[in-house]
Image (tube, grey):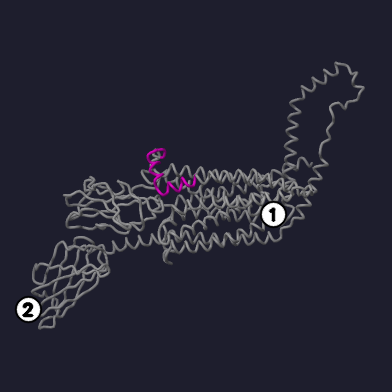
Amino acid sequence: MTQAIAPRAAATTTGGVAFRVRALLLLLLAVIGAVLAGAAPASAHAALTGSDPQQGAVVGRAPTQVSLTFSEKVAMSDNSVRVLDPKGKRVDTGKATDLGGTTYGVKLHSGLPDGTFTVTYQVVSADSHPVSGAFTFSIGAPSQTSVALSDPAVGGGVVGALYGVGRYVSYAGFILLVGGAAFVLACWQRGAGVRPVQRLVVSGWLALTGATLALLLLRGSYVGSGKVGDIFDLTLLGQVLQTKAGAALVSRLLLLAAGALFIAVLFGAYARRDEADASDKGDGSDKGRVDVDAEKRDLTFGLAIGGAVVAAGLAASWAMAEHASTGIQAGLAMPVDVLHLLAVAVWLGGLSALLVALFRAPAETQIDAVAVRRFSRLAFGSVTVLATTGIYQSWRQVGSWSALTGTWYGQLLLIKIGLVAVLVGIAWISRRWTAQLSEAPQAKALATARAELRTKQPTKVPANSRDSSSGGSDSRDMDSRDSNSRDSKSGDSRRAAQLARQQAAVDTTRQKRLRDADPARAGLRRSVLAEAGVAVVLLAVTTVLTSTEPGRTEEAAQQATSSSSQRSGPLSLKLPFDTGGQDGKGTAEVTLDPARVGGNEMHVFVERPNGKAFDVPEVKVAFTLAAKKIGPLPVTPDRIATGHWSAIGVQIPMAGDWEIAVTVRTSDIDQTTVTKNAKIG
């Protein structure tokens, strides 16, 4: 009966653990799929904030160059900026130059015809993400163009998806590697000899190494053509190695080589030293214990220092190439980002190691209450660092309350804050279970199980223990026994395999009974499992956050776009005037079409108070942009008819809040100037 029940109980236990693991994996895949499905093809972190000529502008004569201004520094190649004429032919020299600050320009050929020209750009922002776009301007007057105005497909497609997956895997590997190793050294040193914990840390190293190599190969195609065939292009790989992102990936690989040595020592010499120390304590002998303890302390200190250096270097490989490396206060933001990444790894990676220890560690090496309490304190410190550095990063990247709710970056940040709050709540529940954790029930159950194991050991019968009288047996009886032995050989092997499976099931049941000996330990496992599930979602959201345009940059781009398209139709202003002389009152109506940067057509209509045309001898207009110290730009319109004055090709060089001043002269000595502000461009 026992043999029949035990396999079912063992299968239930194994199935429950496998179900939980599968559930976590499915949750991770679902979150990643949802995020990838909702993400934009290209994550533009540098926004185009201005250009000369501006988008949609109509200029009177052909410019000598086209300049682009971005929200941050960008990397450009010879073909990063292209200018195409109405027929789709390139009219730029092909060499982009740095004009200072965040402005870049490309020279144009001379003798360009009138018509609409298309400017396309594809650059790499300072935080390593590709940026692309296009706009048009016209010379003389707009015309038809054969160029399709669409953004180049950069950072998307199959290569973009693979690159995104590589980023997820690299973050997960970093967390498991750093957090798992920190958990062993700081909380549970016996875990260095536990195989499931070893596999967790080694899996983190393998995931991070493989993802880094994949990102290095994908990088050239990701920021360039986006073609799968360019992944193994050695020329592109050579170009990537000369960039900041390429240097960061290579540095990460070198640090991972040092990390491999760290893992070998941690799970090799250090684990053996811990086993030797435990053996000495178990024997109750003081011989050599002092030397063993001293060697273990020295080895622990060396591993802690070396591991901290490697972990900080790995975190810096992200900080030096992504959000923290650009924008305001970059010198402070990068070390803060390193601390933030380390805090995340120690917390979530340690949580993963604790989960493995609670569910997969053998009963004889089951984690104790002291180790769990150590991790509780370590996790609390990590969350404190995480909150402090996160507040600074949020202020730096969001910039305003409106960006917190009005941009995708801010909305993701709010989701992340909510998930962290949920994690802290679950962690508080885990601390309550930890406070109730007791070693006595488990120790008693372990002693009982070992006693049962000793009593159930099979008795070995010596081969020569047969009765001496059998020595005179007939040889035919021996032949018969040999024949029967050969006939039953296959049946015996099947029975042996069945007994082995039953014994394994009994052992599994015993392991479960030992793990469940303390009810508080079972409650702790459930709360840690829930915490790990939320942590998987948090990791996915955090990874998306690092590849999303910061709220501060997105708002600046939105403001630049709205100001450049503030007016989409003619501008009309009515300005009452009074020159002070006889018959000196009237109204001047100024119209500007299309009221955008570049060439405009202006009309001035002067009317008497009764609405009839006012035949005045002279009208002048001036434009001033005080914010940029431009102007006044005088315009003297031509008289078209009674009370109607006009000027063609009035140039507005920049969008902004312009002051329009109209001077009206009603006699030889009577004149006045009236002003009014209006947004143009």
Q: Is 583 displayed left or right of 487 in the figure?
A: left
**x, y percentage for residue 64?**
20, 53
- Give the residue at mark 2: 668
**x, y percentage for residue 184?**
63, 51
Residue in the picture at 64% in, 51% down = 300
The image quadrant that residue 582 belongs to is: bottom left
Residue in the picture at 49% in, 64% down = 391
What amino acid is found at the position of numbered circle 1 in the picture? Ala
- Give the residue at mark 1: 522
Residue in the picture at 69% in, 43% down = 11
Q: Is 587 displayed left or right of 309 in the figure?
A: left
Q: Is 529 displayed left or right of 77 in the figure?
A: right
* Secondary structure found at label 2: loop
Residue extending farthest to the right is 469
Which of the two residues, 26 or 467, is positioned nearer the viewer here? 467
Could you give the CA–CA distance between mark 1 and mark 2, rounded to whole angstroms?
Answer: 101 Å
Q: Which part of the image, by quadrant, shows the C terminus?
A: bottom left
Residue 241 is a magenta residue: yes
Q: Residues within 10 Å of mark 2 (few under 14, many from 20)?
A: few
Residue range in magenta is 231-253
**x, y percentage for residue 372?**
67, 56
**x, y percentage for residue 471?**
90, 20
What amino acid is found at the position of numbered circle 2 in the picture? Asp
Q: Which part of the image, by quadrant, shows the N terminus?
A: top right
Identify whether 677 is placed above or below 325.
below
Which numbered disc flags the more N-terminal residue, 1 or 2? Answer: 1
